[in-house]
Amino acid sequence: MDNFFQKKKCNCKSYGCDSEDNRPIGCCPPPDCQPDAPTISIGSVTTGEPGTQASVSNSGTNTNAVLNFVIPRGNTGATGATGPQGPAGPAGASENYASFYTVGDITLDENASFPFTGTITSNGITVVGTSGLVTLPSTGVYKVDYGVVPISNAYTDIVSIYLNGEEVAGTRLSLENNALTGTSAIIPAAAGSTLNIQILSGNPVRFYNEADGIIGFLVIHQIA
């Protein structure tokens, strides 16, 4: 069988047929046939859709092939096993809060701390009721609301919030006779700090509320 049927390209210029496309069958008999070595190169590689068939095509010639591949993408695999648990995150702000109150008819000596006779709710924050001294358990920022109902006509009688024995700026008010006197404040405090309602007066002050019996309250909530 001659080189034409073996798909070999011959150098047959001496025979007048130097092209693979126009040479007649058997135009290059030996020894004049000098076949060139065939070549193969890669053209394009394309990703096909999942489930389609892989394919290869030749964009070159029989003796100088350029192969183009289409390889389908695989289907999504099954979910893998659950990994190990990660480390614990940082602790959030402590949820410390309390609400204390006093009922009755009491008279306090001059410059006395306001006492409490009952607790509505408390978490973390503690109080010594007879002295009204509250202990804050955690370092943070606290929102404080307070109020008292005095029987006093002296404009020099004062109420204020004290932290660790020092007056908290912005919490001082003059006592109003037979009316609720109070305010709120945002107070940064360290763990173990003490807080109380302080009455500043030169004479004893009476506290009484005929309407509902509540003569004082203190509400504390750690907000940061």
Image (cartoon, rainbow, N blue to C red):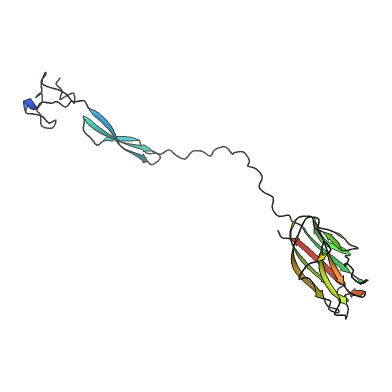
Q: Residue 203: x and y, percent?
A: 92, 75
Would residue 114 be found to the left or right of residue 50 on screen? Answer: right
Q: In front: 199, or 206?
A: 199
Q: Is residue 148 visible?
A: no
Q: Quadrant of residue 84?
A: top right
Q: Quadrant of the N terminus?
A: top left
Residue drawn at point x = 82 percent, y = 65 percent: 166
Residue 23 placement, left or right of 145: left
User: Would residue 103 be seen by someone viewing this image from the given angle?
Assistant: yes
| Quadrant in the picture for residue 47 | top left
Rendered location of residue 151, percent (x, y): 89, 78
Residue sitting nearer the eye, 160 or 46? 160
Residue 96 lies in what quarter of the image? Answer: bottom right
- From the top left corner, tell me how far across and down residue 74 is, in percent: 43, 38
Q: How many marks?
A: 0
| Quadrant the C terminus occupies | bottom right
Work out which residue is located at the far top of the displayed protein and give it: 31
Q: Residue at x 81, y 60 (%)?
A: 121
- Identify which residue, 79 or 96, lies in the foreground: 96
Q: Is 177 situated above or below 10?
A: below
Furthest residue to the bottom?
Answer: 153
Whether 123 is drawn above or below 199: the answer is: above
In the image, residue 43 lies at what x, y percent? 29, 37
